Amino acid sequence: MTTSTPALVNHIVLAWARQESGYPPEPVAKRLNVKPEHVLAWEQGEKKPTVRQAQELAKFYHRPFGVFFLPQPPVIPPLAAEYRHLPGVKPGVESPEFRLALRVMSLRREIALELSKELGVPATEFSIVAHLSETPAAVGARLRGALGITTDEQLGWSSTSSFAISRANFHEGALDRPTTLMMRCGWITIASRRSVKVPLV
């Protein structure tokens, strides 16, 4: 099979993948060097993309190539609905970059839960709260103390993409501390950034 061969993809899944990724047809068409009408025709089942085009779609949407051949779109957990954002940002309209970050965060959450299970360390509820009367410095110091993280460790995190599972959860004598997964995504533009919480338990 050559890359110019039509890919026998499910057009319903194609439409789902684009919409779940947060893209309108125009940037997808630009990426594949086709007209937006072609993208919509693929999603409506009027035409089929080539194998190469379908592979490029999977790469652009950050989805496995094989997902396009499923009989129906996969059932996935909904994205986090509550988060803090900058002034002027419309809630509920997430950028493709932010939607990808939420998917990565959910995946890492599942990995953290599996690791916790294998190590025999139960995940505990993160019950620390902050109040508007507190200064950011005070809240940050309290969180670092609860998580067993120093300022130098925090500043040493990568500026591109990093996450840390508090070391306090995995050494003897500190199992009563909250289990927390922290992630920072540097690929998100400032205008699209949010602060979001997805509990481990």
Image (cartoon, rainbow, N blue to C red):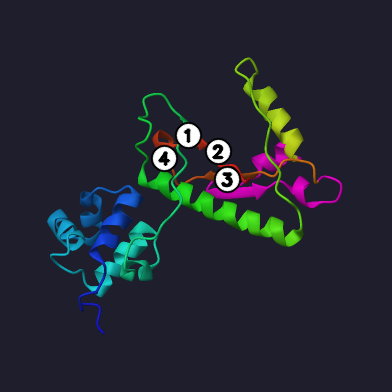
Q: The residue under label 1 is which amino acid type? A: Glu
Q: The residue under label 4 is which amino acid type? A: Thr
Dot 3 falls on a residue whose secondary structure is: strand
**Is disc 1 surrounded by few (<14), some (14 to 19) or many (20+) residues within 10 Å?**
few
Give the magenta part as a residue range. Answer: 148-174
Q: The residue under label 3 is which amino acid type? A: Met
Could you tell me how far apart the alpha carbons at marks 2 and 4 are, in whole angstroms?
A: 19 Å
| N-term-proximal mark, 1 vs 2 | 1
Residue 10 falls left or right of residue 89: left
| N-term-proximal mark, 2 vs 4 | 4
Q: Are marks 1 and 2 in contact (CB under 8 Å)?
A: yes
Query: Where residue 189 is drawn, which disc sits there?
Result: 4
Could you tell me how far apart the alpha carbons at marks 2 and 3 are, in whole angstroms?
A: 10 Å
**Residue at the spot of label 1:** 82
Residue 111 falls left or right of residue 145: left
Query: Where residue 64 is drawn, which disc sits there?
Result: none
Nearer the viewer's eye, disc 2 or disc 3? 2
Q: The residue under label 2 is which amino acid type? A: Lys
Q: Is residue 23 magenta?
A: no
